[in-house]
Amino acid sequence: MTKPSFLLVIFLFSMPSCFLDSKTGMERRIERANNGDVAAQFNLGIFYANGQGVPQDKVESAKWYRMAANQGDMQAQFNLGVLYANGEGVSQDYAEAIKWYVLAAEQNYALAQNNLGHMYSNGIGVEENHDEAIKWYRMAAEQGDATAQLNLGNRFGTKAQNHIEGAKWYRLAADQGLPKAQHNLAVYYAEGTAFPQDYTEAAAWYVRAATQGHAGSQNNLGKLYSRGNGVPQDYEEAAKWYRLAADQGAAGSQSNLGTLYRDGKGVPQDHEEAVKWFRRSAEQGFPQAQNNLGMAYHMGSGVSQDVEKAVKWYRLAAAQGDFYAQHNLGICHEEGKGAPQKNEVAFMWFEIAFTSGNEISLQKRNTLAEKMTGEQIAEGQRLATEWREKFNAPDQSR
């Protein structure tokens, strides 16, 4: 698992004015720091960390933070912890990071409390501990730290499955303008998780996050406009929001925008433009786009017809459980187009698609079975079972 980077606090103490002399301001600051001035030590840590007036030097930054931290300065303790967590200027050492975070957190420093919550929440440098994560997040959240409020909401919403409590903290962070919290609160309204389902309220929160550039909210707002949930149905507005998220690389939005171009909804119908967006999404592994790109190749829509390429994309989507792609693979094997003609394999794919939730595939499977021997049907069933076990796919037909 890739460990996230932690952020330094950037805060400069105001320095007392000095009489003019031959020394530069930096020389006087270093002199003060060497004489034990905590503010000067902390500020030198900031200057060296950011290259302000001196060459950037994280080792030197850590030195000055340590001097201030050893005198009990909570911000220096926090920043030194961040350097240890990120391995900047010091060897990465999560235990040492936690040590300094604790010292700052015990002085009620919210940023350190939030980072401790993160360490316990993700098992970084310590054993994962839900209760300890909640404790530290709550201490920071109750001081009004929006990030801690978001993290506490996430912890209650995902780990504890206490959505009412999660929504409470999301709202506090959302009211402070945090887009991730606004998005999560909108999802609760859209899904009816913590409150009665309310698409109008969901749309209002998605707008707040989307206008701050949150790609997930931009995509979900596009969906609401596509379906007319909580807002008037408006494909042009849907396309606008999908495009904003798609331009940020959001695979689902790229796929959705491709669908609008394919169908000519909210944008002029343009199969080549549809393929462009399907491909961008498909290359990120988004299964619906992989299936749609496969269909474009299958039908020669927006690209030259190439059923073998269609099968390639169908297989990628099918492996992720897309039952439309699984069904399409069954057709290719039944007809022998883009793949070897083999009824047992076609039966397998129709069986898999049906057990994945595609009711249409049941009829195709049964029609094909009328042309097969008992041994061929048994082989098709065996192949389907083997595939589901390999890909850990549940049988949803039961």
Image (cartoon, helix red, strand yellow):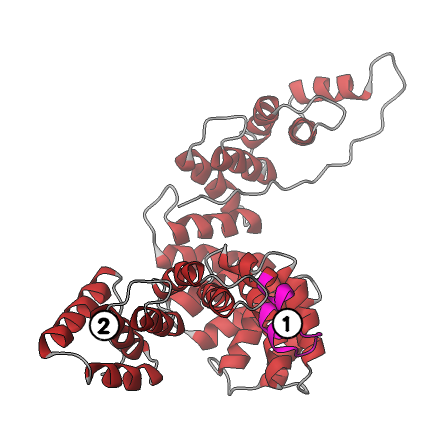
Q: Main secondary structure of the magenta part?
A: helix
Where residue 78 appears, x then y in whole percent?
55, 40
Where residue 386 appears, x then y in whole percent?
18, 64
The residue labelled by disc 2 is 343
Q: Residue furthest left?
A: 375
How many numbered callouts?
A: 2
Q: Residue at x 45, y 67 (%)?
A: 291
Query: For residue 208, what is the image quadrant?
Result: bottom right
Relative to the observer, which residue lies in front, 24 or 396? 396
- Please indicate whether residue 228 sits to the left or right of residue 392 in the image: right
Q: Amino acid at mark 1?
A: Tyr
Classify mark 1: helix, strand or loop. helix
Classify mark 2: helix, strand or loop. helix
The image shows residue 188, relative to residue 244, as above or below, that is: below
Where residue 322 appears, x then y in whole percent?
38, 70
Query: For residue 202, what is the image quadrant?
Result: bottom right
For the magenta stretch, what is the residue range? 258-275
Query: Who comes first in sequence, dot 1 or dot 2?
Result: 1
Pointer 1 local density, CA inside 10 Å: few below 14, some 14–19, many at least 20: many
Q: Does the magenta segment cover residue 131?
A: no
- Is residue 212 in sight in this rendering? yes
- Please indicate whether residue 359 sits to the left or right of residue 175 in the image: left
- Is residue 214 in sight in this rendering? no
Relative to the observer, which residue lies in front, 54 or 392? 392
Q: CA distance from mark 1 to mark 2?
A: 35 Å
Q: Amino acid at mark 2?
A: Asn
Pointer 2 local density, CA inside 10 Å: few below 14, some 14–19, many at least 20: many
Where residue 95 appears, x then y in whole percent?
39, 36
The residue labelled by disc 1 is 261
